[in-house]
Image (cartoon, rainbow, N blue to C red):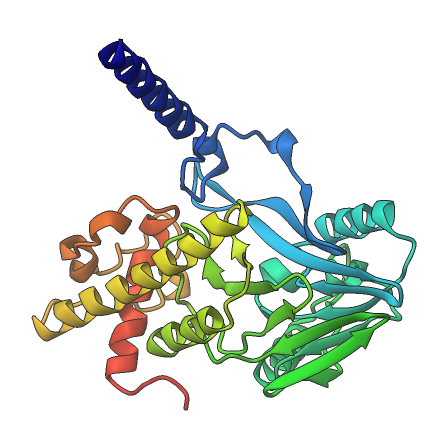
Amino acid sequence: MKRMFFSITTLLLLGVTVICAQDAKLQTGDPLKRGLKESDFPRTKQLASGVYSYEALRGGDPGSFMTTVSLFVVTTDGVLVADGQGNVQQTKEMVDAIAKITNQPIKYVVICSDHGDHTAGNSAFPKSAVFISSPASKKTMEDAAAQAAQRGGGRGNAAPPAPLPTETVPAKRVLKMGGTEIQILNLGRAHTGGDLEVYVPKGKVLFMSEAYLHRIFPAMRSAFPTEWLATIKKAQALKASWYVPGHGFVDDAKTLKDELETYRQALAKVIDESKRLRQAGVPCPVPPPAPAAQRGQNAPAPPKCEAAQKADWGAFKDWTLRGGQEEVAIRKVFDELDGKLPK
């Protein structure tokens, strides 16, 4: 009888293990691989009292999609939003979603990432909202707005220009909204070089924006690779309960914390592998701009990035958008090694 009891108990335990494995979320940044549809988005998730994530779908590489994540905090003295969406329509949808939860006005919009997929729809926010960024992002957005004005941007059916930030956070700013404390943190240069994070101590929720890309291959178009690693370590030192990414899925708190460490390892792997390739003399040239007469079908093929072809990304080779991001990441690490990044 004892042997039979042990056998049945063992099978039951194995059954529970199988069920748990089946219920576990496939860790990927691609909604299609998770079995999700466009109609499943946008979606809102409450993380703590008054603190919500908002995931909307955006296009990635051909045949692949990923989410853009925003955060909003509802208080008795208004709403703070961290990061908008990539166009006016999607940002208006988020504003409408917030209005279904509270009638409190949106008072602050924190620009944690100055990239267009987080700011291009900011004109959908109330005109009375105060826009806050880092000093670096403020300059980036002002320069982009000036260039657009020179090109005649904003004419015709073009979307209205995104509001420019009027306040900046060089290091840290604490807001008291009703009984809620919200910290706006500048933990260092990461994905954009002007990155900010938003921390809600009451729920221990840290929104990391594009300093954390959940299962998205490290994107480094405007990044500072080794400084990005340091930024993640500072975030981990806060010992938050929730680490919310700027792209990828908002899973449960434990998964997101574990996945942040996985992302740190992925970033370190990209840096180390790029260094190895550079030391081995494997090139990754920047494609020169094609003359106007050669653009189009007759344009010559750009030089191949041999380093990308020979790179060994290990466990991170199948991460979402790897094909479109790896060459950029390699070149950015090369630039950092050559001292070409802005101080």
The vertical placement of 215 against 233, above or below, is: above
Left/right placement of residue 247 relative to residue 53 reads left
Q: Is residue 137 visible?
A: yes
Q: Residue at x 46, y 48 (%)?
A: 255
Image location (x, y in percent) of residue 7: 26, 14
Q: Residue at x 56, y 63 (%)?
A: 209
Which residue does the image show at 89% across and 71% down from the upper left? 128
* Residue occupying image coordinates x 31% and y 69%: 288
Residue furthest to the right in view is: 103
Q: Is residue 223 left or right of residue 131?
A: left
Q: On the image, which quarter does residue 260 sit in?
A: bottom left
Q: Is residue 284 visible?
A: no
- Identify the residue at the far front of this view: 1
Q: Residue furthest left?
A: 280
Up-down: is 32 above or below 340? above
Provide residue 217's location: percent of width, then percent of height: 36, 54
Q: Position of residue 106 (x, y in %)?
A: 84, 63
Quarter where residue 276 is shown: bottom left
**180 and 303: which is toward the camera:** 180
Which quadrant would the N terminus be assigned to in this image?
Answer: top left
Q: Looking at the rendering, which quadrant does residue 336 occupy?
A: bottom left
- Which quadrant is home to the C terminus? bottom left
Residue 268 percent location from the top left of the image: 28, 66
